[in-house]
Image: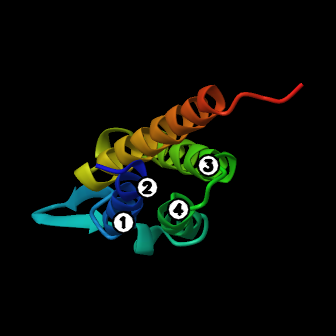
Amino acid sequence: MDKRVVGTLLGIVGVLLWFMPWMAFSMGDMNFHRTGSHVGGIAYVLLMSSLASAVLSWVPQPVPRIIVAALSTLLSGFFWLNAGEEAAWGLVWLCTVSGFSLLQAIERNSAERKSDPQAE
């Protein structure tokens, strides 16, 4: 599959995981879940970075996508560390998908550097 399509799919999955449970906690007999929309504030940066990663996978320069994917990975990791044991599956998978997106962007950058000989 084309790397641009894979990058787009990873970005779309990141957007969808933003709406999934990030934290699960209970009060008595009732169970509650918090999603990215419940967190608000800086969590919207994760939503926008997943969307930007999907769009930037079609841009020839991979450096902006590396920056966006690194930001997304760091922020989702930060939320995962803050959630601790209450972290739900949506946040764990968001961090994983962001990491895969970062690795793919770095791999694409290194592949383009190898294929383009620099004129001296």
User: Which of the two discs, 3 and 2, sits closer to the camera?
Assistant: 2
Q: Name the residue under label 1.
A: 12
Q: How far apart are marks 4 and 2 (CA)?
A: 6 Å
Q: Name the residue under label 3.
A: 71
On screen, 21 above or below 88? Answer: below
Name the residue type under label 2: Arg
Going from N to C along the chain, the mark reached first, 4 or 2, is 2
Q: What element carries label 2?
A: helix
Q: In this view, does 1 lie to the left or right of 111?
A: left
For the C terminus, the image quarter is: top right
Q: How far apart are marks 1 and 4 (CA)?
A: 14 Å
Going from N to C along the chain, the mark reached first, 1 or 4, is 1
Q: Position of residue 22 (x, y in %)?
A: 33, 57
Name the residue type under label 4: Trp
At a point 16% along the width and 64% down the height, the residue shown is 31
Task: Give the numbered dot on residue 4.
Answer: 2
Q: Can residue 87 be seen in this view?
A: no
On screen, 118 above or below 81? Answer: above
Task: Give the numbered dot on residue 58.
Answer: 4
User: Which of the two discs, 3 and 4, sits closer to the camera?
Assistant: 4
